[in-house]
Image (cartoon, grey):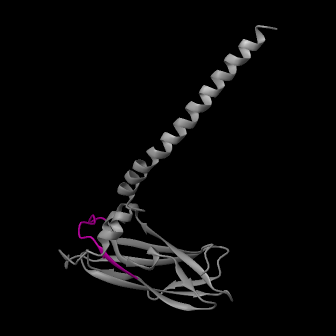
Amino acid sequence: MTNAVPDRKAANRRLTRSLWLFAAGSFAFGFALVPLYDVLCDVTGYGDRSKLLEAADVIETDIAADRSVTVELVTANAAHGDWEFRPAGGDLKVQPGRLYTATFYAKNLRGQPVTAQAIPSIAPLQATRFFQKTDCFCFTPQHFDASQTRELTVRFIVDPKLPVNIDRVTLAYSMFTTDRSG
């Protein structure tokens, strides 16, 4: 009986030490995610907030007048969303290095005010870092009154350094209703 108590105390100490190590490791892993996220953003071109500050400084340079790239505009609505969301026109033929504006129309089909967020996607993945949005409705949540229709714009430049084997880029947006309303 006397051996059982010290064994239990030793087992409890080992368990407590293991749990503390696990908690410290989890805490350290949380801090390690920040640089990992930054690396992922650098590789994919997504989610890098510093690029938003640089976007306002983008100017037309090195326009590739002898080259054109087709920018396909695509929209999608969430399966449970009450939106009419579409591009205003068809595909755009653009010259890399020149600033362009694309327009989208969004209509809140609900009878109440809502806030929406558009999530962009660019394909092919290799083109992501060469597609620079200077101004976009996707940068901030958009508030819509009941049944309101709105014209939304995105301004962009396709970098002249886009690989020559890429002659078509798809700019797609998905519109989601957020929990915020107002």
**Which is more toward the observer, 1 or 109?**
1
Q: Is residue 131 magenta?
A: no
Q: Picture coordinates of residue 8 (x, y %)? A: 73, 17
Q: Which residue is drawn at 27% across and 77% down?
A: 68
Q: Quadrant of the N terminus?
A: top right
- 6 left or right of 91 in image: right
The answer to which image quadrant residue 9 occupies is top right
Q: How many labels does the image show?
A: 0
- 38 left or right of 141 in image: left
The answer to which image quadrant residue 26 occupies is top right
The answer to which image quadrant residue 145 occupies is bottom right
**Which is more toward the observer, 61 or 39?**
39
Residue positioned most to the top: 2
Q: Picture coordinates of residue 45 (x, y %)? A: 37, 61
Q: Please, is residue 104 above or below residue 79 in the view? A: below
Residue positioned most to the left: 62
Q: Residue at x 40, y 61 (%)?
A: 125
Q: Picture coordinates of residue 127 (x, y %)? A: 35, 65
Q: Which residue is drawn at 49% across and 74% down?
A: 173
Which residues, given as a range, are shown in magenta?
Answer: 154-165
**Which is more toward the observer, 46 or 4?**
4
Q: Picture coordinates of residue 87 (x, y %)? A: 48, 84
- 95 left or right of 155 in image: left
Q: Quadrant of the C terminus?
A: bottom right
Q: Which residue is drawn at 43% across and 52% down?
A: 37
